[in-house]
């Protein structure tokens, strides 16, 4: 399977703490994206990092990418109860023009007030 | 602008029946893709359409089919439903054509329960 794998599967923290989620994948990629899903709803795109980038920031989000280890991490700083959701990494195969993404199984983040 | 609209949001069918799900992409988005989400398998790619042509297909049996209309709206059909087809079916659209950045905008999904 080309699916990525997130780690941990579940993460429970207090408001104000930082949350770190990791993603490993198997193939060479064009880019890696992170999406968020609130319970039973659609996914929302958070951030995209290209294969030639090592780190990217967007608001309270920080994403790193290590293509040699085929891994990425998503850091959410100063978490809020509203950040409670499932977070998925998704990869696009290198050279692909067909628009298919491979999603991991997700990390369920719970932020307690 | 309106987001990706999926209908119906919830539906219950029995084994052997068929179902058609509809997706209206964001205005101006020509690419529509479908994913199946289950607790056991996670998000699995079904197919992608661009300009009414299926460009990519995932590893699903022929019971799963789809199409796209000239206004970019898409439908997917599942025939001879099985219990294992119970899932959240997600439609996503993107603006870029082939080779463009593949950032997807998802609909809220259609929750299918097969009894």
Image (cartoon, coloured by chain):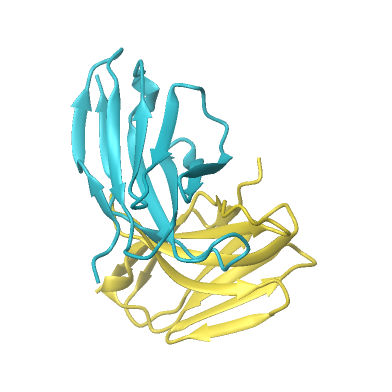
Chain colours: A yellow, B cyan
Q: Is residue B1 left or right of residue A89?
A: left
Q: Residue furthest top?
A: B16
Q: Is residue B53 left or right of residue A81?
A: right
Q: Name which quarter of the figure residue B87 lies in.
A: top left
Residue at image point 27% right, 16% down: B17
Q: List x then y, in percent, for residue A33.
A: 54, 66
Quadrant of the drawing holding the N terminus of chain A: top right
Q: Residue furthest front?
A: B70
Q: Residue furthest right?
A: A68
Residue at image point 25% right, 72% down: B1
User: Can see residue A86?
Assistant: no
Q: List x then y, in percent, for residue B70.
A: 37, 49
Q: Name which quarter of the figure residue A110 lies in.
A: bottom left
Up-down relation of residue A69 to residue B70 (above or below): below
Quadrant of the drawing holding the C terminus of chain A: bottom left
Q: Is residue B82 left or right of residue A54?
A: left
Q: List x then y, in percent, for residue A83.
A: 33, 71
Residue at image point 34% right, 19% down: B81
Q: List x then y, in percent, for residue A61.
A: 47, 80
Q: A3 or A17: which is nearer to us?
A: A3
Disc tally is 0
Up-down relation of residue B36 to residue B33 (above or below): above
Residue at image point 22% right, 44% down: B7
User: Can see residue A6?
Assistant: yes
Q: B61 or B2: which is nearer to us?
A: B2
């Amino acid at each position: 399977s080309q699916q990525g794998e997130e780690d941990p599967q579940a993460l429970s923290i207090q408001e104000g703490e930082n949350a770190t989620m990791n993603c490993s994948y198997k193939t060479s990629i064009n880019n890696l994206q992170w999406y968020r899903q609130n319970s039973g709803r659609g996914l929302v795109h958070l951030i995209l990092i290209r294969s030639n980038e090592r780190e990217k920031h967007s608001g309270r989000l920080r994403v790193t990418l290590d293509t040699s280890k085929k891994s990425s991490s998503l850091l959410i700083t100063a978490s809020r109860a509203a950040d409670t959701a499932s977070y998925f990494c998704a990869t696009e195969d290198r050279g692909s023009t067909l628009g298919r993404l491979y999603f991991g199984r997700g990390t369920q983040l719970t932020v307690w007030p | 602008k309106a987001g990706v609209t999926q209908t119906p949001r919830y539906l219950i069918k029995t084994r052997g029946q068929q179902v058609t799900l509809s997706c209206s992409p964001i205005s101006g988005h020509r690419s529509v893709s479908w994913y199946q989400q289950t607790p056991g398998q996670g998000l699995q790619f079904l197919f992608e359409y661009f300009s009414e042509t299926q460009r990519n297909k995932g590893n699903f049996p022929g019971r799963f089919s789809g199409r796209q209309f000239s206004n970019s709206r898409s439908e997917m059909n599942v025939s001879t439903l099985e219990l294992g087809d119970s899932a959240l079916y997600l439609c996503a659209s993107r603006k870029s054509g082939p080779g463009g950045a593949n950032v997807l905008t998802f609909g809220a999904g259609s929750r299918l329960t097969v009894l």
